[in-house]
Image (cartoon, grey):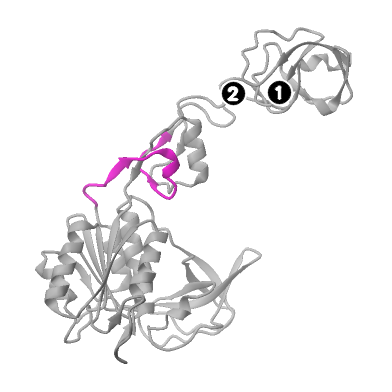
């Protein structure tokens, strides 16, 4: 079997076109973590009028040399004051109040002494002090939040200020999770044979999918027989946008997932990639739905989910891939023995703006060592043509937390 280059598999994922994105309006306060499906454009200036930024007295800047100004009115926030500041006068004004006509500067209360109905100016301020200009926050017609933004608390605040009650968002993809293997035990099930192992793949995948913007649907473990796999994958494909299976994509006698995918009329985008871990990764599509066959070993399935499932979750929301590759400096040597794109668990730290990596606490062995993902973990990325690395070498790491 001729395996595909890793970069080629990533290009295939990147070039997938979604024909019909799922969008819906959602009440603003429930949109945290959703991806915006519209541009948010300001329909007014903020503020619309010159506004006080502090408690103080609205004055004409040119009047400060007089040192004494008469208080003619009070201007609470939210009031519709019609009084105007005339020469030699001031109006007491509060944070958020519209600046009275005739005033161009606000002198804070800390800078004056009140004597009867007058203020005595103890310390001058520059022209326009503490006056918010029209459009200081944003201007009418300005695009404030771009479509494809994952909504955070600040986005919600800005949309509230624009009275966007129910913004249009992308529906989070429904992702079904199926673990295949007659040897697997569900969480809480009683072990009856030494050959049985506790299933962890489906639970780490559920958490991973939720973390990166999908809606996981846990369908549990199914046995290694073709009929069960066909029935369960068909049902999962019907009710979800992405079906993720673990196990059953290799070349063993009981690896039926790859056959089932073809029987369901799916187009296999690729099967087998020169990547470690997870070389037997399979991705297929049917319309705007996908099946991703991950390897059975826990570390392999986790890494390949980050590389192939997470991008599909983002793509179905018209959003960018959320993980980032950065440069780091090695503090431990790295021996590369295999001509594949390799993703190796490493420990990272950020010091004075620079990333450093080592392998303290990371075990060498098979692709089943899930504990290597614990702690401050990133993935050291080495290409097919990379040579062994020495202490001090610059490397690429994929940040996953």
Q: Classify residue 34 as left or right of residue 264.
A: right
Q: How far is the residue under mark 2 from the one under mark 1?
A: 17 Å
Label at residue 134: 2
**Residue shown at the point (27%, 57%) measured from the top left:** 15
Q: Which residues are magenta?
A: 18-40
Left or right of 18: which side holds 309? right
Please tell me whether residue 29 belongs to the stretch shown in magenta: yes
**Vertically, is 139 above or below 214?**
above
Please rate how many residues cluster around mark 2, counting C-alpha atoms within 10 Å: few if below 14, some from 14 to 19, many from 20: some
Q: In the image, what residue occupies the spot 44% across and 85% down?
A: 336
Reading the chain from its start, which is encountered first: label 2 or label 1?
Answer: 1
Q: Quadrant of residue 330?
A: bottom right
Q: Which residue is mark 1?
A: 94
Residue 76 position in % (x across, y down):
68, 19
Crowd band around label 1 with a 10 angstrom C-alpha radius: few (<14), some (14–19), many (20+): many
Check if mark 2's residue and mark 1's residue have beta carbons within 8 Å. Answer: no
Q: Which element type, helix, strand or loop, lies under badge 2? A: loop
Q: Nearer the viewer, residue 382 or 18?
A: 18
* Comparing labels 2 and 1, the label whose residue is closer to the camera: 1
Q: Nearest the camera: 390 or 270?
A: 270
Task: Please report the residue visible at 36 percent of the width from the left and 39 percent of the height from the top.
Answer: 38
Does residue 285 appear in this view?
A: no
């Amino acid at each position: 079997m001729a395996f595909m280059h890793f970069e080629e598999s990533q290009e295939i994922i990147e070039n997938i076109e979604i024909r019909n994105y799922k969008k819906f309006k959602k009440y603003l306060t429930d949109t945290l973590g959703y991806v915006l499906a519209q541009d948010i454009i300001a329909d007014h200036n903020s503020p619309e009028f010159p506004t006080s930024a502090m408690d103080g007295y609205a004055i004409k800047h040119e009047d400060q040399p007089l040192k004494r100004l008469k208080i003619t009115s009070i201007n609470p926030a939210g009031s519709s004051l019609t009084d105007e500041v005339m020469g030699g006068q001031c109006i007491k004004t509060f944070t958020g109040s519209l600046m009275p006509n005739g005033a161009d500067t606000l002198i804070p209360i800390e800078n004056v002494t009140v004597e009867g109905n007058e203020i005595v100016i103890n310390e001058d301020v520059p022209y326009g002090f503490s006056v918010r200009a029209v459009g200081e926050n944003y201007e009418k017609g300005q695009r404030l939040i771009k479509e494809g933004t994952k909504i955070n608390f600040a986005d919600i605040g800005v949309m509230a200020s624009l009275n966007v009650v129910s913004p249009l968002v992308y529906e989070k993809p429904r992702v079904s999770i199926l673990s295949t293997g007659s040897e697997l035990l569900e969480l809480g099930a009683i072990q009856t044979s030494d050959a049985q192992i506790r299933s962890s793949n489906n639970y780490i995948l559920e958490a991973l999918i939720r973390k990166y913007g999908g809606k996981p649907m846990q369908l549990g473990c199914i046995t290694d027989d073709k009929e069960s796999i066909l029935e369960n994958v068909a049902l999962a494909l019907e009710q979800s946008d992405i079906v993720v299976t673990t196990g059953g994509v290799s070349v063993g006698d009981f690896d039926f997932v790859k056959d089932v995918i073809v029987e369901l009329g799916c187009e296999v985008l690729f099967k087998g990639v020169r990547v470690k871990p997870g070389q037997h990764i399979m991705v297929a599509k049917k319309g705007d739905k996908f099946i991703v066959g991950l390897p059975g070993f826990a570390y392999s399935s986790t890494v390949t989910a980050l590389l192939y499932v997470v991008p599909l979750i983002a793509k179905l929301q018209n959003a960018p891939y959320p993980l980032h590759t950065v440069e780091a400096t090695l503090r431990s040597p790295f021996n590369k023995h295999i001509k594949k794109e390799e993703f190796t668990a490493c420990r990272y730290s950020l010091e004075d703006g620079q990333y450093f990596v080592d392998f303290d606490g990371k075990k060498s062995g098979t692709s089943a060592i899930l504990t290597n993902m614990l702690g401050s973990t990133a993935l050291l990325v080495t290409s097919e043509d990379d040579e062994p690395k020495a202490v001090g070498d610059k490397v690429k790491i994929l940040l996953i937390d």
